[in-house]
Image (cartoon, rainbow, N blue to C red):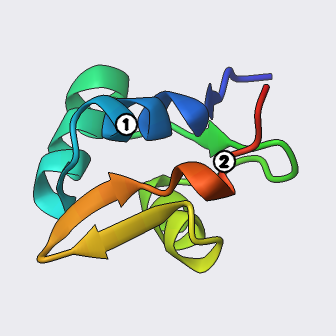
């Protein structure tokens, strides 16, 4: 079974450094590779597109003036 990166690694980066979607995609590709797969507490096997869609759908991020910020109120604590 291939290793999947927990989504919290991306969310933790947004906590430290809010960024545009382009910057976020670049960070993910540089840090984890363009073929990386991600998981959450309930979902597995998400590519970058699915991960970013999940973040928005679950209100894990707030996007203001094109900058993605962590929505701390929606982050599970583990």
Q: Residues within 10 Å of mark 2 (few under 14, many from 20)?
A: some
Residue 34 visible in the picture: no
The residue lying at 62 percent from left, 55 percent from top is 73
The answer to whether 32 appears left or right of 44 in the picture is left
- Which of the numbered marks, if any, corresponds to residue 75? 2
> 53 or 44: which is nearer to us?
53
Residue lying farthest front? 73
The residue lying at 12 percent from left, 77 percent from top is 65
Give the quarter of the figure containing the N terminus: top right
The answer to whether 10 appears left or right of 23 in the picture is right
The answer to whether 47 appears left or right of 65 in the picture is right
Q: Distance between the residues labelled 2 and 1?
A: 11 Å
Q: Mark 1 points at which residue?
A: 15
Callout 2 secondary element: loop
Give the quarter of the figure containing the C terminus: top right
Residue lying farthest right? 42
Residue 15 in the image: state x and y as whole percent: 37, 37
Q: How crowded is mark 1: few (under 14 residues within 10 Å), some or many (20 or more)?
A: some
> 40 or 65: which is nearer to us?
65
Residue 32 in the image: state x and y as whole percent: 37, 25
């Amino acid at each position: 079974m291939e290793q999947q990166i927990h989504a919290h690694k991306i969310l933790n980066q947004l906590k430290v450094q809010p960024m545009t979607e382009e910057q976020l995609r670049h960070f993910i590709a540089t840090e984890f590779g363009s073929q990386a797969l991600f998981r959450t507490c309930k979902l597995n096997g998400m590519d970058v597109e699915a991960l970013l869609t999940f973040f928005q759908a679950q209100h894990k991020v707030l996007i203001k003036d094109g900058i993605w910020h962590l929505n701390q109120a929606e982050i599970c604590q583990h």
